[in-house]
Amino acid sequence: MQAISELISYVMQKPLLAIGLIAILLFWLLEEDASALTFSQVTVRAEDYAQSVLLWCALTFKEEYNNKPSIVFYKNRKTKDNRYGEYHGSTNEIRIFLNKNTTIQDITDTIIHEFAHAIQHAKDGLKNYDRYTRQYGYQKNPYEKEARALAEKYAPKCLKDLNYLYA
């Protein structure tokens, strides 16, 4: 219940976020797939929505990780490997590349994926990340597989919860 009240309190401070999420609700009510909406189709700013997803993660995974990371947004950053985001353990910072995250689904998946890296960093400092990448490649790196699995499992719930809270 505390999670709901914290999210509602956050939304009440951001009227454009509330309006945008109501637009998302309308798409759902019309049986459209709102997760495919781009941020140019709704009035919610990607940055505000991302903060809501981050708060959702902090509340959902508080047992695993209780030090909510900050988010830094990059609008036009080019990455050599097509990344949507990255986690930096030294600063406890999630970096989001907005030019790659164009849909509500993208932002939701990326924040949960990078939050998974924050949890992993708290557990073991991601000490084997580089070795695993060299040994198995990025896609088969166990840290990446775990982060993708967490995003795949929890993104639908996050989308549903945020839709419910902002309606």
Image (cartoon, helix red, strand yellow):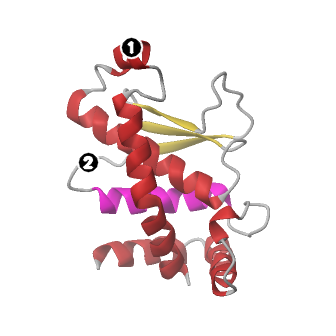
Q: Position of residue 121 (x, y in %)?
A: 30, 32
Quick check: 86 above or below 33?
A: above
| Disc on res. 80 | none
The image quadrant of residue 130 is top left
Residue drawn at (42%, 28%) of the image: 140
Residue at 37% over, 43% down: 116
Q: Which residue is mark 1?
A: 135
Residue 110 part of the magenta-drawn span: no
Query: Dot 2 corresponds to which residue?
Result: 65
The C terminus, quarter of image: bottom right
Lower position in the chain sequence, tag 1 or tag 2: 2
Rendering coords of residue 65 (x, y %): 26, 48
| Pointer 1 local density, CA inside 10 Å: few below 14, some 14–19, many at least 20 | few
Q: Secondary structure at mark 1?
A: helix
Residue 32 falls in image quadrant: bottom right
Q: Is residue 79 above or below residue 153?
A: above
Compared across the picture, whether 47 is left or right of 116 comes to right
Q: Is residue 60 magenta?
A: yes
Q: Most prominent secondary structure in the magenta stretch?
A: helix
Quadrant position of residue 54: bottom left
| Magenta-tinted stretch | 45-61
Q: Position of residue 112 (x, y in %)?
A: 44, 50
Side of 12 where 145 appears, left or right: left
Q: Give neighbour class at mark 2: few <14, some 14-19, many 20+ (Cα, 10 Å).
A: many
The x, y position of residue 118, in whole percent, is 35, 39
Give amino acid for label 2: Tyr
Q: Residue furthest right?
A: 40
Q: Nearer the viewer, residue 31 or 39?
A: 31
**Distance from label 1 to label 2 (Cα)?**
28 Å
Q: Amino acid at mark 1?
A: Gln
